Each structure stands twice: as C-alpha cells, then as structure tokens.
Image (spheres, helix red, strand yellow):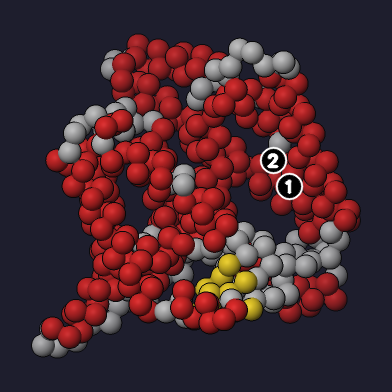
C-alpha cells in the first residue's frame, strides 16, 4: 500500500514471516502431517521446501510487481440488474432471518439437545461450518456474513421496532471511541480461539451454547450503547474477522448494489484502526498453535510446563490449560514481534525511515497525499 517501500517491505515481511517455519519446520506441518507415517520425504525437508517457496514467491512479487495495481478503483455492478437484486432490502431481510434461525437452532440444540459433540448440531456448526467454512466463502463471494449476521439482524430489527412502538424515540447512540478501533474484535477472536483450542471440553454442546449466549449479551450491550452499524463494523469479532477475508474477494457491495472489483483490491482500502495489526497476529498465531500443539516439540514442552505447574499445587487439568494458554500467547506475540521487525527493517531500506505521518492517530485512512509530501521532504 505504500508505494516506494512496498517491494522491500514485501521481501522483508516474507523473510520475517518464515523465520519460525525455518527454525521449527515441524510446526507448520504438525497439524496435518505428524499423524502420517508413509511420507516419501522427511518433515524437515518439507518444511524447508515450503519456506523456500514462500521466499521465492515474495521475491518474484517484489521484482515483477514494482508498482501498485490494487489501489485503482475498478468496481462495476453486476450485469442485468443482478447486483441491485442481491443488494436489495428484501434479500438483506431474508438473509438476516436465515441467520437468526440458524443461531436460534444452534442455541436450542446446544442447551437441550443430545450432549454428545459428534451427535449435536451446535459444535459442528460453530467450529466447522461457521468459523472454518465461512472463510473460503468470504474469499470467493465477499462479505457474506454481513448479510447473515444474526446480531446485526436482531439489532436492526430492535431499532426498527423501538422507533415505532415506544412513545418517545430512544436516545441516540454514543459516538464509537476511535481509540477502541478493532480491539474488541481482537479480544473476541482470541477468546473464541482459546475456547476452541485450550479449554477442556470446549466441544460440549452446552458449553458452545452458553458461550454463544454470553457473547450475544455482550454484543447487544455494545450495539445498544454505540449503535448497530459502528459496533458491528469495528468491534463485533466475527464481522471484522470475515470482512478481512472478504477483502480478497472480487465481489463487493456498495450502497445497495453488488459488483465486481479486482481480486485483492479490497486490501488497499483497509482502514488502519487501532488493534488491526494485533488482530492479524491473533489470527495467524492461534492457527499456528493449532498446528504446533500436535507437534512433538510442543507436546514435550507442554508436558514439562504442566508438570512444573502441577508440582506447585495446581491441578492437572488447570496446569495443562495454563500451559496451552501460554503457548497461544507466545505464538501470537511471536507473530507480532516478527511483523514489527519486518516493518522496522523495511523502513531502514535505503537509509530512509518510514513516514510518521502515515501512522498519525488522527488519520483514519491512509492518505496518499501525505506520502507524496513525505517523499518530497526526504
């Protein structure tokens, strides 16, 4: 997104991003490979090969893509009025109803249904169909979750009813604090990943349903205080999460019309709000822990750490939970530190530091004019 520094930053960012894979190649393949015993190649060779592919790929991008191509607007509506149909109020309401129904079925199934994870709708839907399945859907078809988001639908319906049934209009929502940025989404995604990966019995249907109810209560309070639109777009964890993936998609909704754009071009319009970098570090770090937790290295470390905690008086289950929690936090911190090192290194390429104006808290969007001014002054 920063024009002159994009090439070296891409190279350094890629190099920093694969340091962990180079140092611990089994981490990258622990989740899907460690259980196999018939691989024709050793895992260390696969790890180094994958790391080299990443480095070569980013070197190729730095060489063959020297000028920005994603910042130019190329959006055009879908032909034959299809974009207006997909973006219409009727379709939006219908999708919202479907989302609320699925959410209600999930809660009911988890609370009163069969309390066996493999025989209950709630765990499979939440952990597989929702959290994993919506990622490729968002990448291919855009911000689909926005239309089906049950908390957005419930909040908008509540506002509509309140405006028509209450004797006096409700007070306007408070302005969303700029300093909050995406920090509520950071906390939400981390806690969801922690529940899934660390907490014992997290796949119990009743646990899933109770967690969904607690999260819904918090979301309802946020939308009541700051308004449905601001809270959903900036703070609601899953809206922010899937929206990041949807920026890779060629489909984009503007106003009430769906259209096509260049794939990946949505990334160039991402607003650098507080907490964005930490959110991405949480996304990468928790997925990395999901793989690392099944590797021999972490299993040995977790056993030793849990054994130490148990020796000081903590129970076995609590000790293992604390050990895995520390592992998740370590990988998230590692990803964040590697990113900061990459940015610092990229800023020193050519002896020029990164422009401070681009990081000014008062600038809610990246300002190309400020970058041009910085170039002239340097």
Q: Residue furthest bottom?
A: 168
**Figure check: 286 above or below 75:** above
**Figure check: 330 above or below 154:** above
Q: What kind of element bears circle 1? A: helix
Q: What kind of element bears circle 2? A: helix
Which circle marks residue 210 in the picture? none
Residue drawn 17% across and 42% down? Answer: 111
- Which one is nearer the viewer's eye here, 63 or 264? 264
- Which one is nearer the viewer's eye here, 183 or 160? 160
Quick check: can you spot residue 66?
A: yes
Q: Residue furthest front?
A: 80
**Figure check: 145 above or below 258:** above
Q: Quadrant of residue 316?
A: top left
Residue drawn 75% across and 61% down? Answer: 354
In three-dimensional space, the C-alpha distance between marks 2 and 1, rounded to whole angstroms, equals: 6 Å
Q: Position of residue 104 (x, y in %)?
A: 22, 54
- Which one is nearer the viewer's eye here, 3 or 150? 150
Q: Position of residue 143 (x, y in %)?
A: 49, 63
Which circle marks residue 17 in the picture? 2
Label 2–label 1 contact, CB within 8 A? yes
Quick check: can you spot residue 279?
A: no
Name the quarter where the N terminus is drawn: bottom right
Q: Position of residue 107 (x, y in %)?
A: 22, 48
Taking the image as shown, residue 9 lies to the left or right of residue 152, namely: right
Q: How many labels were placed on the picture?
A: 2
Residue drawn 79% across and 59% down? Answer: 6
Q: Which residue is mark 1?
A: 13
Label 2 CA crowd tier, 10 Å (few <14, some 14–19, many 20+): many
Label 1 CA crowd tier, 10 Å (few <14, some 14–19, many 20+): many
Taking the image as shown, residue 53 lies to the left or right of residue 250, namely: right
Name the quarter where the C terminus is drawn: bottom right
Residue drawn 80% across and 34% down? Answer: 52
């Amino acid at each position: 997104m920063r024009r002159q520094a994009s090439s070296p930053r891409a190279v350094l960012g890629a190099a920093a991003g694969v340091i962990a894979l180079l140092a611990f190649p089994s981490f990258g393949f622990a989740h899907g490979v460690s259980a196999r015993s018939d691989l024709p190649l050793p895992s260390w060779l696969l790890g180094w090969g994958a790391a080299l592919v990443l480095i070569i790929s980013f070197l190729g991008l730095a060489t063959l893509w020297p000028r920005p191509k994603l910042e130019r607007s190329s959006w055009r509506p879908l032909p034959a009025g299809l974009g207006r149909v997909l973006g219409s109020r009727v379709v939006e309401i219908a999708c919202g109803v479907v989302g609320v129904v699925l959410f209600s079925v999930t809660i009911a199934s988890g609370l009163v249904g069969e309390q066996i994870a493999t025989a209950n709708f709630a765990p499979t839907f939440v952990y597989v169909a929702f959290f994993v399945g919506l990622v490729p859907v968002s990448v291919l078809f855009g911000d689909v979750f926005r239309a089906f988001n049950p908390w957005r639908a419930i909040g908008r319906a509540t506002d509509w009813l309140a405006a028509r049934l209450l004797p006096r209009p409700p007070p306007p929502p408070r302005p969303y604090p700029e300093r909050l940025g995406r920090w509520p989404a950071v906390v939400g995604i981390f806690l969801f990943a922690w529940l899934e990966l660390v907490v014992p019995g997290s796949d119990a249907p009743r646990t899933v349903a109770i967690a969904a109810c607690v999260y819904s209560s918090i979301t309802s309070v946020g939308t009541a205080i700051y308004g449905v639109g601001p809270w959903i777009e900036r703070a609601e964890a899953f809206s922010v999460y899937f929206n990041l993936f949807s920026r890779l998609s060629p489909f984009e909704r503007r106003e009430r019309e769906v259209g096509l754009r260049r794939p990946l071009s949505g990334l160039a319009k991402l607003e650098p709000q507080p907490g964005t970098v930490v959110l991405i570090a949480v996304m990468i770090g928790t997925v990395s822990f999901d793989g690392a937790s099944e590797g021999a290295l972490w299993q040995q470390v977790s056993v030793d750490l849990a054994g130490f905690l148990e020796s000081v008086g903590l129970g076995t289950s609590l000790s293992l939970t604390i050990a895995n929690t520390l592992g998740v936090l370590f990988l998230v911190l590692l990803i964040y530190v590697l990113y900061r090192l990459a940015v610092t290194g990229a800023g020193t390429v050519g002896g020029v530091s990164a422009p401070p104006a681009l990081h000014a808290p008062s600038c809610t969007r990246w300002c190309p004019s400020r970058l041009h001014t910085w170039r002239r002054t340097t």
